[in-house]
Image (cartoon, rainbow, N blue to C red):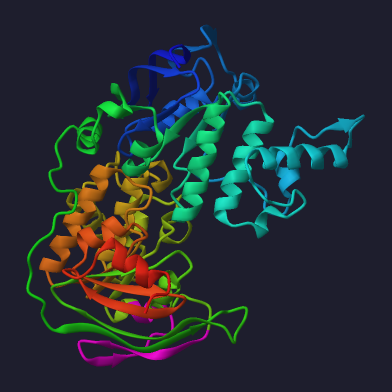
Amino acid sequence: MGSYILELKNICKKFPGVKALDNINLRVKFGEIHALCGENGAGKSTLIKILSGVYPYGTYEGKIYLDGKEVQFRNIRDAENNGIVCIHQELALVGELTVQENIFLGNEPNIAGVIKEDEMYIKTKNLLNELGLDIDPRELVKNLGIGQQQLVEIAKALSKNAKILILDEPTSALTEKESNTLLNILCRLKAKGVTSIYISHKLDEVLSIADTVSAIRDGQYIGSKDINEISKSELIYMMVGRKLDKLYPRKKRERKDCSFEVKNLTVYDPEIQSRKVIDNISFRAYKGEILGIAGLMGAGRTEMVSAIFGVFPGKREGEFYIDEKKINIRQPIDAIQNGIALVPEDRKGTGLVLNMTVKENISMASLRNFFNFIIKEDEENSYTLRYVRDLNIKTSNIEEAVNNLSGGNQQKVVLGKWLLTKPKVLILDEPTRGIDIGAKFEIYELINQLVDEGVTVIIISSELEEVLGISDRVLVIYEGKLRADLPIQEATQEKIMYYATGGV
């Protein structure tokens, strides 16, 4: 592992008005797992787009060396032909095609244009066996879970004889078990000489899997360290340029009156109408506290808050109370008018309209406040600018398309949209998924500020460390049922996992 398979020298990339990469120099050893860390907007995505041919040679300055020889990629296929394959956060699979059709899409074994189905099946089966995957090559990809789809992407990369595998946030949507399977496969590939460049905001994961870690900040290369020579706090300092003594800023507060109550909530599967996805759950949330909701993926957490907000398509039974007064929620507008806001787990799919501007996204849930026969643009602009400032949203201007922002700044836009509705109860479903450590800290501080201002906050997170770090009380859900209601003083990772796996 002493020799370098990849070297980047003096890489610079400019966009109008922005220098995204400023003189990046980076070396990756043969057969290692090399983690690339940095905040959202640091330049990681731009760098891997250069490496994978998305940004062709000539659109950036600097040189790339592969096995000691300079390479110049005109497109993605050039990079893949040289053994560099990137698996992006948004998977590039076609759900209506089979596993084998996805793996060999565009590279099907054929004779005179006639696809050799049997050969494709055998090659796919061999690739899946190599990865230790028990997946039928003829299964439609849409029938697979996200974790299996991620592994199909790796099989697809190996079919292209990948020497360097670039993985961008590969475990952001995976369960702990699925994440462990993927990490074990990367270790297996490493033993076979495949080099991986691993991008993740999950620093504990980085420290457990990587051989070397490099940090970039504001488009500049900060440094590289052997994983045995760096601590988590040192890595955070390299990424954000300042010490975060406490990642989870906890404040002592006095719990006040009950502001939101759910009674006997039962929610039914929209397709199998006899199946309960939430089974007779009741709980209270109070002013002056952050209520955490924990549970394994599929436990029903998202279905529960979606039903509360009036957006879940299945039948629902139960009662809701705001400040001891019963309210009726049939659809999201009812929830909004009663002071309930929901920041969804899928910010790109359901939280934002990506091709619309920052201003349009922030104001869309509160347009009635700016409407008097026509939109009062001055007021709309004023409120938008306020939330851009208060939430520290990094954008060139409020007319910029949200699609151009980093993940952390997109999440802040979603928060701004719902804060503008002046909620009494703010429900946050995976509010820090896929965003960097600095943006996480800012969101935690914002949550504390909102609670101080009288907002009741309910937070769902798959990261137990986050649930324990930010919450004052934790509800644990298992298979649609409430298993535990734990004051934070009694909550531990072990106790939460006990209840989350069916303990009583």
The image shows residue 366, relative to residue 334, as above or below, that is above
Toward the viewer: 50 or 474? 474
* Residue at image point 18% right, 84% down: 258
Toward the viewer: 440 or 424? 440
Residue 448, given in percent of the width and then of the height, sits at 15, 61
Toward the viewer: 164 or 330? 164
The image quadrant where one finds the N terminus is top left
Residue 147, given in percent of the width and then of the height, sits at 55, 52
Which residue is at the far top?
A: 69
The image shows residue 467, relative to residue 66, as above or below, that is below
* Residue at image point 25% right, 55% down: 384
279 left or right, relative to 219:
right
The image shows residue 46, relative to residue 141, as above or below, that is above
Residue 325 is covered by the magenta coloring: yes
The image quadrant where one finds the C terminus is bottom left
Toward the viewer: 271 or 395? 271
* Residue at image point 61% right, 22% down: 83
91 left or right, relative to 122:
left
Residue 330 is covered by the magenta coloring: yes
156 left or right, relative to 414:
right
Q: Which residues are magenta?
A: 315-335
> How many marks do you count on the picture?
0
The answer, for residue 284, to whether it is visible in the render is yes
Residue 483, given in percent of the width and then of the height, sits at 36, 79
The answer, for residue 416, to whether it is visible in the render is no
Residue 112, given in percent of the width and then of the height, sits at 92, 29
Residue 379: name its quadrant: bottom left
